[in-house]
Image (tube, rainbow, N blue to C red):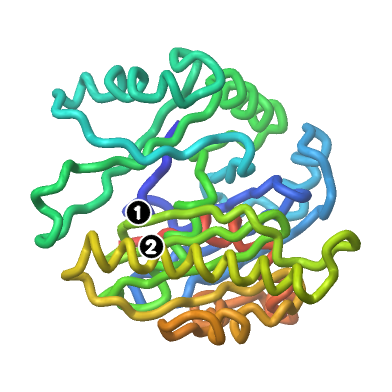
Amino acid sequence: MSFKWLWSTGPDGWTAIDCQGGIFGVSVKSPRKPGDRAVVVKHASMPGASLDQANLTQMSKLLHDQGFPLVHVLARKEYQMFLVDKAAVRPEEMESSLRWSLTPLLDYPASDANLSWMAIPQTQANSNRMPQLYVIAARRELINQRMDFFERARIPLTVLDIRETGQRNISAAIKDQEAAVCLVYAEPNGVQLTVTYQGELYLERYIRESLFDSHEDSATNTADQKLDRVALEVQRSIDFVHRNAASIPFDGIFVAPTQSDIGLVQKLQSRLLAEVSALDLNTLFEWPEDSDLVKPEVQALYFNALGAALRWKE
């Protein structure tokens, strides 16, 4: 399982398929340098469709073969992400060390896990702290089955990716990254938060609060309580970055488009001290002519696929 870095010297673009809540696919021509917009060549969706060989084959036909390598975004329930201290071991011993560390955290044998990891960069302010890693674990059986699944559909995978690194890619493209950026994306079952600086992921949080209306909690006070809890967790995350990476300038909070208009920007603005702005994906991507991707609610459906496909070409 490979979580490929967003900078690429190889292909001219990437195709990404996200299969959470349906099947959503995009083919994106990579920008040449930061500041350029990525060009979405093709996009297609099968809302509510299950992940099976017939649907994957149909999605491949809808996207048309652009000759781009394929990224598959794992669904949130298909992997776990842990923050662990980096052991002082030789590089070839790191995987064994991480398996030992994750043994009490996984609900299946650590020997059955596929592991990948990324270092959290250290700053001058926290250079004396123990280095830490984000470790991603997924069942090896699931990963092997998924790769075989795509192979049988004749669309072989190049990269398996996770939702957090896709969001990091989008966050890294927002500005020139002279300051850290907090990006908030609310999906139906929770809120994903990332803090990115100079293209590196410094912090990720998943807040398990649904901000979208449902029959059982449509009362105003319940909705307000959920917003209060989300805002509190966002503020705690920002405070954590300020404490542990005080030398990094902070450039505010951006809120990604949502699948329905829940007024999230305004609601967070009234609850947080930092500046809160709406993320305009039109400044990061160039859409196909007459595409429905100009609509924020459609952008939200493709958000994770867009992030996974957004990789620069040097």
State the mark number for residue 70. none
Q: Residue drawn at (79%, 76%), measured in percent from left and top?
A: 220
Q: Residue furthest front?
A: 221
* Vertical comparison of 82 with 45: above or below: above
Neighbour tally class for label 1: few under 14, some 14-19, many 20 plus, Cα within 10 Å: some
Q: Position of residue 187 (x, y in %)?
A: 67, 60
Which of the pair 253/60 is nearer the observer? 253
Q: Which quadrant: the C terminus? A: bottom left
Neighbour tally class for label 2: few under 14, some 14-19, many 20 plus, Cα within 10 Å: many
Q: Position of residue 265 (x, y in %)?
A: 59, 82
Q: Residue drawn at (77%, 57%), measured in percent from left and top?
A: 45
Judging by the rendered image, the residue that carries numbered circle 1 is: 8
Mark 1 vs 2, N-terminal side: 1
Q: Is 163 placed left or right of 89 in the picture? A: right
| Pointers 1 and 2 in contact (C-beta within 8 Å) | yes
Q: Residue drawn at (49%, 77%), measured in percent from left and top?
A: 254
Report helix, strand or loop for mark 2. Answer: strand
Q: Position of residue 86 (x, y in %)?
A: 23, 34
Q: Is 11 placed left or right of 261 in the picture? A: left
The quadrant holding residue 177 is: bottom left
Q: Position of residue 127 (x, y in %)?
A: 10, 52
The amino acid on which the numbered mark 2 sits, given as a three-letter code, is Trp
* Vertical comparison of 7 with 58: above or below: below
Q: Residue drawn at (34%, 18%), measured in percent from left and top?
A: 100
The amino acid on which the numbered mark 1 sits, given as a three-letter code, is Ser
* Vertical comparison of 110 with 55: above or below: above
Judging by the rendered image, the residue that carries numbered circle 2 is: 312
Report helix, strand or loop for mark 1. Answer: strand
Quote the CA–CA distance across marks 1 and 2: 6 Å
